[in-house]
Amino acid sequence: MDLTEKWQSDDISALESLFRQYREMVFKTAYLVIGDKEDAKDILQDVFITVWKSRSTFDPAKRKFTTWLHRIRVNQCLMKHRKKQPPRVSLEEVRDSGLDLPETRDSQLPEELSISKWEYEKLVAAIDSLDGKYRPVLILRYFSELSYDEIAHVMGIPLGTVKSRLNCAIKTLGRVLVNEERKEVTQ
Amino acid sequence: MKCKDVNELLVPYLDGELSKEEREVVELHLSTCPGCREELEALATIKTGTRQALKVMAAKVSLPDQSWEVIEQRLVSKRRPRIPVISGAKSKLRGGIDMIRGRLVS
């Protein structure tokens, strides 16, 4: 019997194991969407209370457990529905977090392409300023690494809407960066 | 296909979310259009930067340790059977205590 089968057979210790396995994912995704640590903590608790209460509704033949979990998390975030300022990060905090930022445009980020410190700061600000309907889709794709189909299911929106929102979100971020660059040049 | 139409497909192209046919159309257009190739490169940079920025924003917060205990408590308190409150029990108890106290004083 695997973990989800045990959990679906009313084994509360299996719920605890699932919690320990997925708590970071749920908490951090909720934090990125909501922008408040305390709210994200409440959402994490509410999500796993719902996971326990709704254990009979999960069908492993239809969806992955993580997709089902994300859907509950999205619903809890919507229920919270408190529009707060999204998290803002200073460069000092970035360095404190242990991730190296490149000194110049040509140096490499931990991922494959390069981005300057300036671009990074502007990008964080641009993500913060994104419209509420684009932000969750962006986070589900580029943080949670869900497929378009999974995002459509989790958000309860058509696949075409996922495509257009992601397209629009990435292009908006690009426009913000270009505008910021122009401002700097004219100053 | 025109640049405007291809442009709509560039983000899903980068995300590997196009059908085989769509991908072939995009690649054929890219092979002949330097403008769209440049756009693709810019979008790829933003996409990678976005991924990185989100990772760093998430790395900034850490999860409190006591979360499971709180959940367990909430689940247990919901499962515990309710004890019926006997009407007037509290005031009767208070009266008994007062009576004992009165006797002790006297």
Image: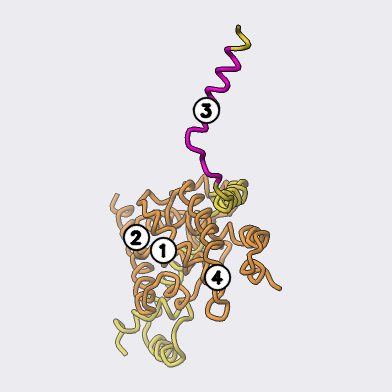
Q: CA distance from mark 1 to mark 3?
A: 57 Å
Q: Secondary structure at mark 2?
A: loop
Q: Which residue is mark 3?
A: B92
Question: Which range is magenta?
Answer: B83-102
Three-letter code for the amino acid on which mark 1 is drawn: Pro
Three-letter code for the amino acid on which mark 3 is drawn: Lys
Q: Which residue is mark 4?
A: A56
Q: Residues within 10 Å of mark 4 (few under 14, many from 20)?
A: few
Q: Which residue is mark 2?
A: A132
The extreme right residue here reads A1
The circle drawn on residue A136 is 1
Three-letter code for the amino acid on which mark 4 is drawn: Ser
Q: CA distance from mark 2 to mark 3?
A: 58 Å
Q: CA distance from mark 1 to mark 4?
A: 27 Å
Residue B86 position, x and y percent, is 51, 38
Q: CA distance from mark 2 to mark 1?
A: 7 Å
Q: CA distance from mark 2 to mark 4?
A: 32 Å
User: Do callouts 3 and 4 point to residues on the same chain?
Assistant: no
Mark whose residue sits in front, 3 or 4: 3
In the image: residue A172, left or right of residue B76: left
